Image: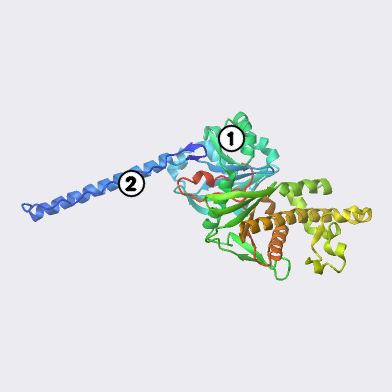
Amino acid sequence: MAFNGHQRDDEGIDEDETPTKQPRSDKEKPSDEASASAGRAASDRRTSNSTARLRSDSVKKTRPPFPWFGMDIGGTLVKLVYFEPKDITAEEEQEEVENLKSIRRYLTSNIAYGKTGIRDVHLELPDLTLCGRTGNLHFIRFPTHDLPVFLQMVRNKHFSSLHTALCATGGGAYKFESDFRKMADLQLHKLDELDCLIRGVLYIDSVVSSGPSECYYFENPTDPDLCAQKPYTLENPYPLLLVNIGSGVSILAVYSENNYKRVTGTSLGGGTFLGLCCLLTGCSTFEEALEMASQGESTRVDKLVRDIYGGDYERFGLPGWAVASSFGNMMSREKRESVSKEDLARATLVTITNNIGSITRMCALNENIERVVFVGNFLRVNTLSMKLLAYAMDYWSKGQLKALFLQHEVNHSSTHLDHRDQTLFFMSCFDVRHLF
């Protein structure tokens, strides 16, 4: 398999067979037997020690060189997962080249990199054991349009002297492959993003042993006084519907770790929300758009069922508060002049979220799946959309569908780490993101 472009042989060294016990000759004396037994025991110890040394040497030789990380290059964000070893011996520290030390110091001593790179400290996973090493897992992100800055930094830190290839997933692993080669003298070892996503969801849920449960749902999502986040255990998770909300949306029906299919998707995702907000409000970042949305009122922008049917909507089986026409009120000049940028941002968020929820519900019905896991960068610090999705799934399915979320909002997450899957692990984790 490949790990940061490093090919490894997963075939271990077999245990030496235990020496078979020979039948005692009648001519042997007790003292001779004791001497022979002691000799065999000493031989066994030497064999065992030798095997252990060989196995240890084998692990060292096949273990990929540091640094360990993977990238998910999406349409909006680049996400980086970095493993920081914490069990470095004095001998290893002396042998480390300055380039590697420089990269480790740079990544772990900063929480911001340049103007747009961010390390999500609250998502750090401490004290993980990977490939026999103990360390912390870091999540870093930066906008995809700043990838040239990242490549220049990789070049300046002489990263190609440590690795000749990087593990990467996402559409950008194909789009920017030549840029990595020309600007940073690096090859990209490309991995399937859907494989990484599914295995990552399962891995993240399995390694979080302290703090809040990785998987959770909202109880009473529309009631400010009663709304509460409740833990949910992903034991026996199949089948599940996995809704990955990034720049666009992909919906996967997952029947086992290796048995899944892409049911459908929509181009109306996080990129749509941010793009429309930039046009309508003049904002420039996802966080700014969400802040505006949190302060706005979408009913000033949208036309509701009660606006069309008056008080007679109940006979149609529709709640009066349901949106009948997104942005429908904007046909009126008077109403256009009365809305704020915050209202427009909120209506945009509701429009995108409702569309995702509606498509998801139809997919769940068609696939006969009652458990839905929503992941992706669109949900990062976006409690508004999570609660909207939670309420929509519960209301329209009459309680049959449960909307689940992850603390690490996996958008191409890591995977469970046996020897054959270590490469995929560094491919993403949550909606990980940013710069070295």
Of circles 2 and 1, the one toward us is 2
Amino acid type indicated by mark 1: Lys
Up-down relation of residue 427 to residue 343 (above or below)? above
Q: What mark, if any, has residue 157 been given in the picture?
A: 1
Color scheme of the displayed model: rainbow
Where residue 38 appears, as percent x and y from the top left, is 18, 52
Q: Which mark is residue 52?
A: 2
Residue 166, compared with residue 268, is above or below; it is above
| Lower position in the chain sequence, tag 2 or tag 1 | 2
Horizontal placement of 289 versus 102: left or right?
right
Can the viewer see residue 249 in this picture?
A: no
Q: Nearer the viewer, residue 159 or 216?
A: 216
* Front in this rendered view, residue 70 or 269: 269
Task: Give coordinates of residue 229: x percent, y percent.
Answer: 65, 65
Which residue sits at x=39%, y=42%?
11
Numbered disc 1: secondary structure: loop
Disc 1 crowd, CA 10 A, few/some/many (<14, 14-19, 20+):
some
At 83% across and 67% down in the image, what residue appears?
313
Q: Position of residue 227 (x, y in %)?
A: 69, 68
The residue sitting at the top extreme is 182
Which numbered tag is attached to residue 120?
A: none
Q: In the drawing, does residue 108 fall left or right of residue 116?
A: left
Q: CA distance from mark 2 to mark 1?
A: 37 Å
- Residue type, mark 2 in image: Ala
Q: Judge left or right: residue 70 versus residue 114.
A: left
How many marks are shown on the rendered structure? 2
Q: Residues within 10 Å of mark 2 (few under 14, many from 20)?
A: some
Q: Name the quadrant of the C terminus.
A: top right
Q: Which of 377/43 is in front?
A: 377
Dividing the picture into quadrants, the one containing residue 321 is bottom right
